[in-house]
Amino acid sequence: MSDTSKKIFDLVIVGVSATMMLFIVNIFANKLDVKNQDNGETIENISDNLDQIDLTNEVTHSTPKTLVIATTENPIEQPNDAFEKFTKLASRIIAYGDFQKVSMDIEMESEDDDLAMISITLDNESGIYRAYRSAFDKINKTTSKNLGGIFAGKSISVNIPLTEDIVLATTGDEYALTGASTKTLTLWDNLLVSPPTVFRLMIVPISVNDGNFNSYSITRLNLNYTCKDDSNSCQLILCTADQPNYFSCLAENLGMDIANSWYSRSGL
């Protein structure tokens, strides 16, 4: 068996195992020092000094980009069982380059006026957005509502940052282990392998009324992002169904050298 074939075989086995396990710029204003103003001291010749301001380190941002994952014409429907749920809802996404900001733009539609929470899984990190766990298998509705984690209506739109701190309810296993009801983290910092890499992202609407997954369909799921240093060199790429594993997705989109580098860094 060739090295590439062995890698692909290994990744298929790892992918199946992972599928079952995973189910479940602040802007600072420049402040003048005015502590001696009580002594009658003044600030003079401000306009004369403007041409001396060094702008070479000014922070710049690249042109915003968008990766479209789901649309009204191609929504993410809610499947019926755990394995199908993960394989259908988990998107495999290449992350290449240095990112300044990444956020999710989500829209969910329901035929009924319902209340929903949003479960997020990114690689091995998972939790319910802005919710509060009160037991291994219970979420406290009142506290979750106060945290902003319960959404109402037939059409729900939410923007969730991946490169900033957010609050998630802990998983049942985390609650049982630590007793913590919430956790604060930056999801992008928890990628299993740093870019260039492939990661799994799964968004699941949960009905507050009955805990089911089939009340809402995801009619829009976009990843909006900008690159660091105005480079425009970063990129998010959606793996396709005919790319059966991480290695083949990286190899076909970015080349064998990057795929081999990822394979070495991933420890598979």
Image: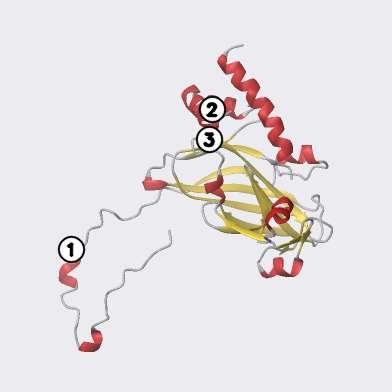
Is residue 28 visible from the viewing direction of this image? yes
Quickly name the residue at label 2: 263
Horizontal relation, residue 140 to residue 163: left or right: right
Which quarter of the figure has residue 138?
Answer: bottom right
Q: Quadrant of the C terminus?
A: top right
Marker disc for residue 84:
none
Residue 265 x %, y %: 51, 31
Amino acid type indicated by mark 1? Asp
Q: Earlier in the sequence, mark 2 or mark 3?
A: 3
Q: Is residue 107 above or below residue 231?
A: below
Give the amino acid at mark 2. Answer: Tyr
Q: Nearer the viewer, residue 169 or 243?
A: 169
Instruction: Return the residue at label 1.
Output: 51
Asked if 47 appears above or below 255 in the picture, the reply is: below
CA separation, marks 2 and 3? 9 Å
- Label 1 crowding class (10 Å Cα cut-off): few <14, some 14-19, many 20+? few
Image quadrant for the N terminus? top right
Instruction: Determine the secondary structure under disc 1.
Output: helix
Of 152 and 200, nearer the camera is: 200
Q: CA distance from mark 1 to mark 3?
A: 44 Å
Question: On the picture, is 212 further left or further right than 220?
Answer: right
Q: Separation of disc 1 and disc 2 at Cα?
A: 51 Å
Looking at the rendered structure, the kind of residue marked 3 is Thr
**Position in image of residue 143 (x %, y %):** 71, 69
Q: Which residue in the rendered view is the most extreme toward the front?
A: 177
Left or right of 26 in this view: 182 = right
SS label for mark 3: strand
From the image, state whether disc 1 or disc 2 is nearer to you: 2
The residue that mark 3 highlights is 197
Q: Residue 191's spot in the image, x, y percent?
A: 55, 43
In percent of the image, x 78 and y 37: which residue is there?
Answer: 83
CB within 8 Å, label 1 to label 3: no
